[in-house]
Image: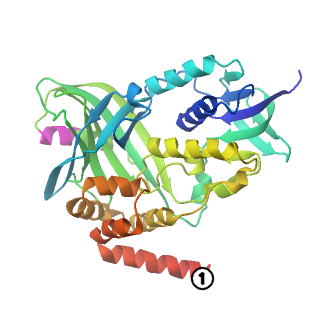
Amino acid sequence: MAQQHFDFIFAGGGLATLMTLQRMLQSGSFTGKSILVIEPDSNKGNDRTWCFWESGSGEWDGLLSRQWDYALFADAGFSNRMQLAPYRYKMLRSSGFYSSIYKLAKQNAGITFTHDTVTAFTDNGSSVTVTTALNTYTCNKLFNSIYKPEMAQKSKYPLLQQHFIGWFVKTDLPAFDKDCVTFMDFSVPQRGNTRFMYVLPLSETEALVEYTLFSKDLLPVAEYEDAIKDYLANIGVSCYTITETEKGNIPMTCHPFWKENTKNIINIGSAGGWTKASTGYTFKNTTKKSRELISFMQKHNDFRKLGGKNRFWFYDLLLLDILHKTNEKGSSIFSAMFRKVQPQLIFKFLDEETTPAQELKVIWACPKMPFIKALKNRLMFVKNF
């Protein structure tokens, strides 16, 4: 059988792939091109819940499950119910997102989806060879979204995880503030880590309740679940039904993934460093990165020219350095920030849209010694590297 050739191949069919594919189709610049998406999972449904803040209306509003105008931040001695305007906190379930992209793709004859597993790929200079469990393909350009943790683990930069287990619960009696998301609740025992509860209320009797950590190592499943049970008991919820569960593990690292790109292979999604390193937020970063990628491809042909560091990369690195060495400091850092800075400025800062003066205001609100030490250690590291 002749080896099949495509203009573009996507290794993996998750968020980054589908959003990039959508932008390719919407741009009109890739009409008539052959595209193959290789995805091992043939039953993608509500396997993800993505949230993001946004000012005003946005391109994903038609797919949203819920929006909130208020957010709660809390720790053991502080609680603040914050108005977010002009921002809103938005929730999108993955099944609707997947369906919308699949529907768009079916309208384009040049797109093929196959259920298979990519095992290797090689840039041959003028083309890329992609080997799967069942076939071998060639293409002009490959988008790889298969994350390899060993790549970041060997890096000189720290690797943490945003890991969580969440329960969708339905209570017998009203228990949740339906207009207010619990953004971070650090009142739970920290146990030497950065641990918090995250609650997305769907109504007064329904919510997604997640136990989340920013740390190096995962926990036994029972520890997450016991923490959720304790939290629900502490807010007075004793009778409830678990309707769905979800879990996740998102890499938090400043590893320069773009340096692994070749002329014809680009790493995208978590494999390309598209996750915001300091928070683990992925969806909004992916909207920006996918848009940048399509704009780049309309003008350039060499993926090695895309990517690089900026000052926000360095801010993220300092925070990860602190949490890597002293993980228990996460609560004090985030608490100081939300006590002293308006959430609108924090969101703008995390979106990397602030001026240096605004960034200084956010950074100055945080405990200073950990950042001074982290900065000193980084400068010494660079000097001796």
Q: Nearer the viewer, residue 155 or 255?
A: 255
Viewer can see residue 49 = yes
* Residue 233 magenta: yes
Is 298 displayed left or right of 356 in the figure?
right
Q: Is residue 45 above or below residue 16?
A: above
Q: Residues within 10 Å of mark 1 (few under 14, many from 20)?
A: few
Quarter in which the N terminus is drawn:
top right
Quarter in which the C terminus is drawn:
bottom right
* Displayed quadrant of residue 201: top left
Type of amino acid under label 1: Asn
Viewer can see residue 269 = no
Is 93 displayed left or right of 257 in the figure?
left
Q: Residue at x 83, y 41 (%)?
A: 127
Q: Is residue 71 above or below residue 172?
A: below
Q: Nearer the viewer, residue 90 or 183?
A: 90
* Residue 280 magenta: no
Q: Nearer the viewer, residue 262 or 193?
A: 262
Q: Residue at x 43, y 31 (%)?
A: 60
Q: Is residue 238 above or below residue 188?
A: above
Q: What element does badge 1 sit on?
A: helix
How many marks overall?
A: 1
Q: Residue at x 50, y 76 (%)?
A: 378
Q: Residue at x 50, y 41 (%)?
A: 287
Colouring method of the image: rainbow
Span colored in magenta: 229-235
Q: Main secondary structure of the magenta part?
A: helix
Q: Is residue 321 above or below residue 202?
A: below
Q: Position of residue 379 (x, y in %)?
A: 51, 80
Q: Position of residue 146 (x, y in %)?
A: 62, 41
Q: Position of residue 203 (x, y in %)?
A: 20, 27
Residue bearing the label numbered 1: 384
